[in-house]
Amino acid sequence: MIIKNPKFEISCVSPKQYPTSNLPEIVLVGKSNVGKSSFINTMINRKKLARTSSEPGKTRQLNFYNIDNKFYFVDLPGYGYSKMSKKQQEQVGKFTESYLLKRKQIALIIFLVDIRHKPTENDKIMYNYVISSKLPFIILANKADKIAITKVNEAKNAIQNELNPIGDAICLPFSSERKIYIDDVWNEIKKEIMEI
C-alpha cells in the first residue's frame, strides 16, 4: 500500500473536537509503550509522523492521523501507566470509553500487545471491552523483532490462546523494526475499508 500524503490532523479529548469528515477510523488500543505510534509510522512508511517516546504514558489524548483522505489512524492513550495521577487516569478513561462506545466511524480496532510477555490483567480487561463493543478487531502481537524469528509463531499462538482461546479472532505478529508482516495487516484493514 503506497501512502502519499499522511498528516497529523488533531488531538482530541471530546466529541465536539473530532473530525467531521466521516472517513472510516482504524483505532489503535494497547498498554502504554506497546508501540502504537511506531506502528503508525511503519504502516505509512514515515519516520516521525506519529511521535514516539521511550517514556510510557506520553499519549493522553485521541490523536487522529489523516491517511490520504481515505481513512484515519486513531491513536488512543495507552493504559496501565502508573505515573499518571488517578484523576488523569479517570479523565483519560472517560473520553476513551466515550469514543469507543459512541463513535460511528470506527471501522476496525487494532489491539496491540507485546509478543514477549503474557497478556496482563489490563490487557484482558481491554480485550473484553473490545469484544463487548462488537466492532471488528484484530490482535497484533507487536515487537516480534525482540524474539528469535523461529519463536514468533509460538509466542503469537500463546497470546491468542490466553486472550482468545476459541480462536475466532485474527492474531498477527508485527515488527516496526524489521518492517515485516505489514502486508498482512494492510489486508485486514482493506477488508474493513473497501474503498482503499
Image (spheres, rainbow, N blue to C red):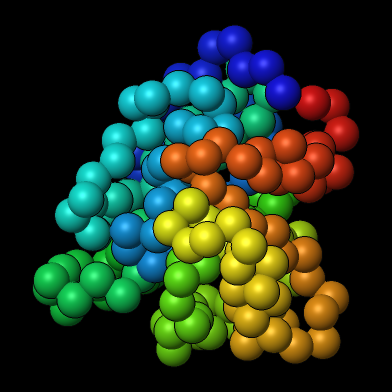
Picture residue at 30% right of the left edge, 35% below the top = 51
Where the C terminus falls, by quadrant?
Answer: top right
Name the quadrant containing residue 46: top left
Query: In the picture shown, does residue 52 fall above or below 30?
Result: above
Picture residue at 75% right of the left edge, 88% below the top = 165
Name the quadrant containing residue 85: bottom left
Residue 55 appears in the figure? yes
Provide residue 107's location: percent of width, then percent of height.
Answer: 72, 48
> Between residues 162 and 8, which one lies in front from this camera angle?
162
Query: In the picture shown, does residue 28 fall above or below 82?
Result: above
> Between residues 12 and 121, which one lies in front from this camera angle?
121
Provide residue 62's location: percent of width, then percent of height.
Answer: 40, 48
Picture residue at 40% right of the left edge, 43% below the top = 37
Farthest top residue in view: 4
Provide residue 97's location: percent of width, then percent of height.
Answer: 48, 68
Provide residue 167's location: percent of width, then percent of height.
Answer: 81, 79
